[in-house]
């Protein structure tokens, strides 16, 4: 029913409009957006779902971030998942779950073994996400909403924007 494809530059503003529709006004003021400013999403992982008529029904994006312990020079790479959204008229059909599972499998295949997000634990726990107690997002972020999946053993510190 839905076709999932990699987000292309032509999809960009349509996806932005979907996010504007699905999230509260001012979403770009959230601290997680500071980790995305000026950094392209991870190629191949950001995906769009369109119906048989080509209408955009859902989208998911991923950014690279790094976790740096206090006073350390080394860091651990991670994927920041989100935003993920499904058009209000298409919610509850399983599309959000499809987008999540499809892109998480792709992330694993691409060598990303550590994914984090800021979101509702009651939703994301179904995909295996649990709270990351030792990982700090830039303030103001509710620590209870900082969730991770994958190899987080021994990883602690501040989440920072990716810089090459
Ligand atoms: C969250 C979202 C992506 C889920 O997409 P979806 O296609 O409706 O999800 P699915 O159909 O795969 O799953 C629906 C299930 O998720 C649950 N769910 C959806 N949002 C939830 C939330 N915030 N907290 C807890 N459960 C949630 C539904 O109650 C439903 O539960 P059920 O399976 O027991 O019936 C979609 O609701 C959405 O775009 N919401 C607005 C934007 C948003 O909040 N994005 C997430 C950022 S935290």
Image: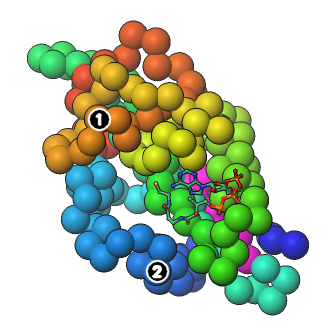
- Mark earlier in primary sequence (2, 1): 2
In the picture, measured across the screen, residue 44 lies left or right of residue 77, that is right
Q: Which residue is mark 1?
A: 143
Q: Residue furthest top?
A: 154
What's the residue at 48%, 74% (across, down)?
Answer: 22
In the picture, measured across the screen, residue 124 lies left or right of residue 135, that is right
* 47 within the magenta span: yes
Q: Residue furthest left?
A: 71
What's the residue at 54%, 42% (across, down)?
Answer: 122
Residue 39 image position (x, y, % from top left): 34, 56
Q: CA distance from mark 2 to mark 1?
A: 26 Å
- Pick the front one: 86 or 104: 86
In the picture, measured across the screen, residue 134 lies left or right of residue 73, that is right
- Bounds of the magenta segment: 43-50
Q: Residues within 10 Å of mark 1 (few under 14, many from 20)?
A: some
- Pick the front one: 114 or 144: 144
- Pick the front one: 5 or 148: 148
* 108 within the magenta span: no
On screen, residue 130 above or below 96: above
- Pick the front one: 89 or 35: 89
User: CB at mark 2 closer than 8 A to ligand 1?
Assistant: no
Q: Residues within 10 Å of mark 2 (few under 14, many from 20)?
A: some
On screen, residue 24 above or below 134: below
Residue 58 image position (x, y, % from top left): 63, 70
What's the residue at 43%, 48% (across, down)?
Answer: 119
Residue 30 shows up from this direction = yes
Image disc number at residue 21: 2
On screen, residue 24 above or below 121: below
Q: Residue furthest front?
A: 122
Residue 163 shows up from this direction = no
Residue 156 image position (x, y, % from top left): 31, 19
Kind of element beneath mark 2: helix
């Amino acid at each position: 029913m839905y076709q999932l494809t990699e987000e292309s530059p032509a999809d960009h503003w349509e996806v932005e409009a979907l996010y504007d529709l699905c999230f509260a006004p001012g979403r770009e003021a959230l601290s997680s957006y500071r980790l995305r400013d000026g950094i392209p999403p991870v190629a191949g992982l950001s995906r769009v779902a369109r119906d048989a008529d080509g209408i955009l029904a859902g989208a998911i994006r991923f950014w690279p971030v790094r976790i740096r312990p206090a006073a350390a020079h080394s860091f651990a790479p991670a994927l920041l998942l989100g935003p993920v959204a499904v058009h209000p008229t298409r919610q509850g059909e399983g599309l959000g779950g499809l987008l999540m599972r499809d892109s998480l499998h792709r992330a694993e295949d691409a060598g990303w073994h550590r994914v984090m997000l800021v979101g509702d634990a009651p939703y994301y726990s179904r995909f295996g996400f649990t709270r990351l107690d030792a990982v700090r997002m830039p303030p103001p972020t509710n620590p209870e909403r900082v969730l991770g999946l994958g190899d987080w053993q021994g990883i602690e510190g501040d989440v920072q924007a990716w810089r090459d």
